[in-house]
Amino acid sequence: MGKQWMKPLGAVLVAGTLLVGGTAWVAPGNYAYAAEVQGVQQNVINVVGKGEIQVKPDIAYLSIGVNSTAETAASAQKANAAKIQKVSNLLKNTWKISADDIQTSQFYVQPNYTYSDKEGQQVKGYTAHHTLTITYREMDKIGELLDAASQAGANNIENIRFTVENPENFEAQVIEKAVANADVKAGAIAKAVKRQLGAVLSVTQGDANVPVFYATESSVAKDMAQSAAGTEIETGQVKVSTTLSITYEMK
């Protein structure tokens, strides 16, 4: 549930009423108001303000995989286990990445099929696949890390996800922008209908949103192939945003 701030009920006479079939319903405790008031109209403006800022990502999730093909499932799995162990040792020992930041995200062994009119569908060997997801925070060393993993036997660099680890650090900034955006919208509406904008009656905050920027498998592979000096990964920027539903009094 979103966060909500409310102005005291007594501040505006009609803000607490709910129109049902043209008749205003008042909570039982509000004895100061008549139980039925015909034709009540709420003099309010409801708008949604959006606040957004762009920031440099400070955390990346790297998908580093190893594939092995062999005649039997057992031999494919055995060959792949040796390769993934080599890659894992590199990450832990050479790159000093904590075991908590290395997680198996995908593992399977599957048959490879061929088809011909003469033989029909036939199993021609098996492929074992193992993917590690690496949590990494040194943005300027990602390309170097991918090159090292590739040299150690990783032959399936799937993607990189960039995001912000602690979006709450930017919450105050996006809230201020969302309020300013809502003020502009509500002020324009009030002016258009020849009224004046009054006090804020309520504010409800939507969930903060941090889109994830993806470097896909094809783009990473292209960078690795074209860069003779080493893979260069551009982190770009990600957006941190929030929305506020604000109700204003209309004078």
Image (cartoon, grey):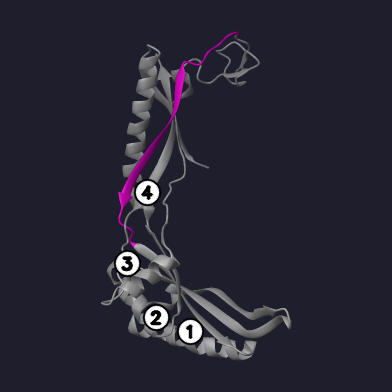
Q: Is residue 51 magenta?
A: yes
Earlier in the chain: of badge 4 and badge 3, it is: 3
The picture quadrant where one finds residue 180 is: top left
In the image, what residue type sits under mark 4?
Answer: Val
Between the residue at mark 1 and the residue at mark 3, the CA separation in whole angstroms equals 23 Å
- Magenta residue span: 38-58
Between the residue at mark 2 and the residue at mark 3, the CA separation in whole angstroms equals 15 Å
Mark 3 secondary-structure assignment: loop
Q: Is residue 56 magenta?
A: yes
Q: Closer to the camera: disc 1 or disc 2? A: 2
In the image, what residue type sits under mark 3?
Answer: Ile
**Residue 91 appears in view:** no
Q: Are marks 2 and 4 in contact (CB under 8 Å)?
A: no
Mark 1 secondary-structure assignment: helix
Q: Which mark is residue 240?
A: 4
Q: Mark 1 highlights which residue?
A: 84
Is 68 placed above or below 250 here? below
Between the residue at mark 1 and the residue at mark 2, the CA separation in whole angstroms equals 11 Å
The one nearer the camera, 67 or 213, is: 67
Dot 1 surroundings within 10 Å: few (below 14), some, or many (20 or more)? Answer: many
Earlier in the chain: of badge 4 and badge 1, it is: 1
Earlier in the chain: of badge 2 and badge 3, it is: 2
Q: Closer to the camera: disc 4 or disc 1? A: 1
Q: Mark 2 highlights which residue?
A: 150
